Every structure is written in structure tokens, then in C-alpha cells.
Amino acid sequence: DDVVSAYAAPEERDVETSLRPRQLDEFIGQHRVREQLEVLLRSAQRRNRPPDHILLSGPPGLGKTSLAMIVAAELGSAIRVTSGPAIERSGDLAAVLTTLARGDVLFIDEIHRIARPAEELLYSAMEDFRVDVVVGKGPGATAIPLDVEPFTLVGATTRSGLLTGPLRDRFGFVAHLDFYGAADLERVLDRSAAILGVRIDTAGAAEIAGRSRGTPRIANRLLRRVRDYAEVRADGIVTEDIARAALAVYEVDRVGLDRLDRAVLDALVSSFGGGPVGLSTLAVAVGEEPGTVEEVAEPFLVRAGLLARTPRGRVATPAAWAHLGRTPPPGSPA
Ligand code: ADP
């Protein structure tokens, strides 16, 4: 099941680094976001000022970290990388902020998970390039104001709904990354195959692209698994037949659903007759947080035409029934 999880496995970091696009014009797809970012960066460069803070939101594996690095590279700036969960105390954040040089990019991944006191410190840093560091406790505590060099914060989140209003309001530019279409994923695969030295034909790339859940990280991972299979079981060339055979071995289904996706569809169809069913009831049935079901599984299921969100609850579409090889009962909403 792991082969279609959109989250990066720790051992995947090195290969991801080698496959990462380094400049805006190497970044495939997402045309609108790319255009908006380019204008933002160029105009800031003209004014010789760091660009506004940037928030990138969207499901995992769509290129948020890559874009953060591209922002720094395009500006010719250094980048400091941290994450919301790594910043437990405001002091952790103050230490990072006060060592930034003018124009640096600070990338905070999973920014929705930042601890509240640190988040409050971030407000003044983002707005006024100043932080008040509190030293001591109780009545003797004093706030020491410290200057922060003008910097650009790039925040990434898979759960933009969890961001507080004050934090969201301090980003001058918010970009939402969407799932990639088949043609863009094929370009991602061709590019990665060239970097990895894998021979792949058009039909082979199309077959993998169609099962990548609209996600470049998954496309790249499936490419590596299919390459392994092609080397061990054939002549190393990734064709449509080889891709099909390999993906069957890895139990990646026709549309590339992962374990949670399948669990959600299965519960919807088997336990709730196809719905409509409320989000929290559905989440309990699959043993997940409602937020995870809503923001991790549902976007792709909706995009794939397998699940519909209606005012009365979640509904399995006819395509979902067909995908599970089931027939909807007569009179069901599907
Ligand atoms: P996120 O931070 O959103 O989880 P990443 O930026 O880490 O996603 O992207 C995961 C991998 O997918 C990268 O290493 C890169 O190889 C690939 N990738 C993502 N977006 C693109 C893109 N637009 N063009 C080419 N490769 C991409």
C-alpha cells in the first residue's frame, strides 16, 4: 500500500532531491501558480525588496517543498528549512528568526502544526520584522525586542483549513496546488526517467501516469518500482505491458487508490449503502480523524469522480460502485 501513499518515506529523500525541479521553468504544470509566483518574484527583485510571504497549500507530494526551494533559488537567496512540529517553543523560532540574513527564505513545512506561542511570535516577525523574546518567568519576566532582517516566509500546509485567520492574513500570496492531469504527469515521468537513466516509452509513461493519483511524488515512486520490475523480469525498458504487470505486482489499482481511499469508498458502499453519510460518521467507520478523511482522502476521490460531497453528506458515485465491482441497490442516490 505504501507505494501509493503521497507522503515521502524517509529513505526516499535522497532520490527526491535528485528529481526535484530547481527552477521555475523546470517545474511542470500548475501554470497559474507558476505565473503568479514569477510575477511576484520578478517585481520584488525590481524593487530590490524581499517578496511578500507565500503560503502554499495542497495535498502532499504536489510540489510545495520544491516550489519553496525554487523561490529561494530564483531570488538567489539562502533557504532555512524547518517544520511546524519541530517548533515547539517560541524560543526555537526566535533562534531561527534572529539568525536570518536579509532576503533569506524561511520555509516552514506543515505550518498548521506550529505551537500557538510560536505562531504569535511569527505574527510580529512577518509583519514588522521584529520579535519580542520573553526572558524569565512570573513577575520578573521581561520582553526584549529583537530586530529580524527582512525575510520571506514560505509556509506549506496540507490542511489550510486548520490555519488560524491571523496567520493566513499575514501571507501576501496564497497559492493552492491542485492534482496534476495525465499529460503533466507524463512529462514529470519523462523528466525523471531521463535523470534516472530509465528507458520508457510513451504508452509506458501513460500507464504509470494514470495510476499516480494526480501526484508527482507517487508518479516518481511508481516509476522506480516499474523500473525494478523491468530490469529483473524483462530487458529494462518500461513499456505499457511491463508497467501493467509491475503495477499488478505492487497491487496498485487502475486509478491508483491508496489504502485510506479504498477504505473510505468501501465503508461508504458496504456500510452506508452508498450514502449520503456525514463526514464524522464516515471517519469513525474507517478509524480516522474527520480532518484526515476530508483533506487527505476526499480531494482525490472527488477529483476522480468517485465521491460526491452533498449538503446531506458524502455519496458514492456510480463510478465508485463500478470501481468496487458492485451494483448500487435500486433507488439508491447513485
Ligand atoms: P510536497 O512538499 O508538496 O509534499 P515535493 O515538493 O516534496 O512535494 O515534491 C515531491 C516530489 O515530486 C519532488 O521531489 C519532485 O521530484 C516531484 N515534483 C513535484 N512537483 C513537481 C513538478 N511540478 N515538476 C516536476 N517534479 C515535481
Image (tube, rainbow, N blue to C red):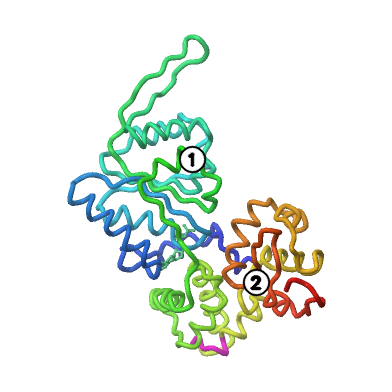
- What's the residue at 66%, 62% (across, down)? 310
For mark 2, what is the residue?
306
SS under mark 1: helix
- Numbered label attached to residue 287: none
Q: Quadrant of the C terminus?
A: bottom right
Give percent across and percent down for residue 126: 36, 37
What's the residue at 44%, 20% (across, down)?
Answer: 134
At a point 32% along the width and 33% down the height, the residue shown is: 129
Kind of element beneath mark 2: loop
What's under tag 1, amino acid-wise? Gly
Distance from Cα at disc 2 to Cα at disc 1: 32 Å
Name which quarter of the figure residue 171 lies in.
top left
Residue 236 visible in the shown view: no
Where is residue 199 drawn, in percent x and y? 44, 84
- Whether residue 129 is situated above or below residue 51 in the rendered picture: above
Find disc 1 in the rendering and name its residue: 165
For the residue pair 31 and 274, the one nearer the viewer reads as 274
Residue 312 x/y as whole percent: 71, 59
